[in-house]
Amino acid sequence: MTATLPTRRTRTARRTVLDGAGVPLSALLALPEDAPPRATVVALHGAGMSGGYFDGSAHPDASLLELGARLGFAVLAVDRPGYGDSAPLLPRGSDRQEQSATLRAALAAFTATHETGAGLFLLGHSYGGMLALTATADGPAGAPLLGVDVSGCGRHLAVDPGPPEGSLRRTARHWGPLRCYPPDTFRSSQALVGPVPEREQGDAGAWADLFPGVAARVRVPVRLTFAAHEGWWRQDDADLAELAAAFTAAPRVLVERQPRAGHNMSLGWAARAYHLRALAFAEDCLLPADLPPPTQRTGRDTP
């Protein structure tokens, strides 16, 4: 018998707006029902998407917001600067470094008025992964930074950034094989997709040169995930080893591949598996850095 995902939500994310030093950042927020959050997951979408990318449009059980809240986390899926409520103020968008400053100001304002638990765990997809790493490297955002989880973002592009937005070749890179996604994904995802702001369009091409400096300033655990059918980034063994080695100050670096997934894995059949692994990594980041030494065995069991 084939298992099916439930089609009704047990909890609904609510819309909120963050203040990024005068720039309004719209977001979706899901909270645990019966207790304060253990930590807060800040989810950052890729180019041409929105924070709703993390809310499982085709199948609710694929939603990071729903799953994270059920497991005791607050989950905040932010519309990056240039998207959502900030788009009228930033009609050309902003570059990665400016987005980092705006995001960190917004998170500082958020943590001043919300319970965030042990701290913030940044989770970014594609361009949002570049922003998650940059914001982590740039320093505090109002609460301790616990770790960073990035999907769909490497160092070296596997292809030229063209052809133009909307072409079949570009769509195939973004999504991968159709079999990786529930049947209703493309209809239900139409509201999530929009134009990429002008000022962030060149950032992916420049990332290869900027990445080593960013990675060297990340001082929290890092996890990088690549879809089995990733079409944008080089991910052979040498590329992944180079990525991991760049995080010279991070206490822990994991590089993993997600089977049966295309680039937009949080919208696919693999979404739940990926989100569970990301949240398990967040759990690891909550463990104390210095555990007590193991108890010496005496040769007999102690009651």
Image (cartoon, grey):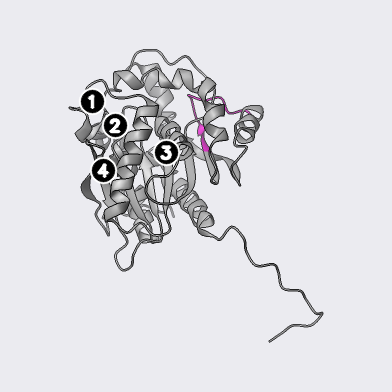
Residue 27's tag is 4
Q: Helix, strand or loop at disc 2? A: loop
Q: Which residue is mark 1?
A: 90
Residues at marks 1 and 2 touching, judged by CB atoms closer than 8 Å: yes
Between 228 and 239, the residue placed more toward the observer is: 239
Numbered tag placed on residue 81 in the rendering = 2
Span of residues in magenta: 225-236
Q: Are marks 1 and 3 in contact (CB under 8 Å)?
A: no
**In the image, what residue type sits under mark 3?**
Gly
Are there few (<14), some (14-19), or many (20+) residues within 10 Å of tag 1? some
Q: Answer yes or no: is residue 124 visible.
A: yes
Q: Alpha-carbon neighbours of circle 4 within 10 Å: few (<14), some, or many (≥20)? A: many
Reading the chain from its start, which is encountered first: label 1 or label 4? 4
Residue 279 appears at what percent x and percent y? Answer: 46, 52
- Amino acid carrying label 2: it is Pro
Where residue 77 appears, as percent x and y from the top left, is 32, 44
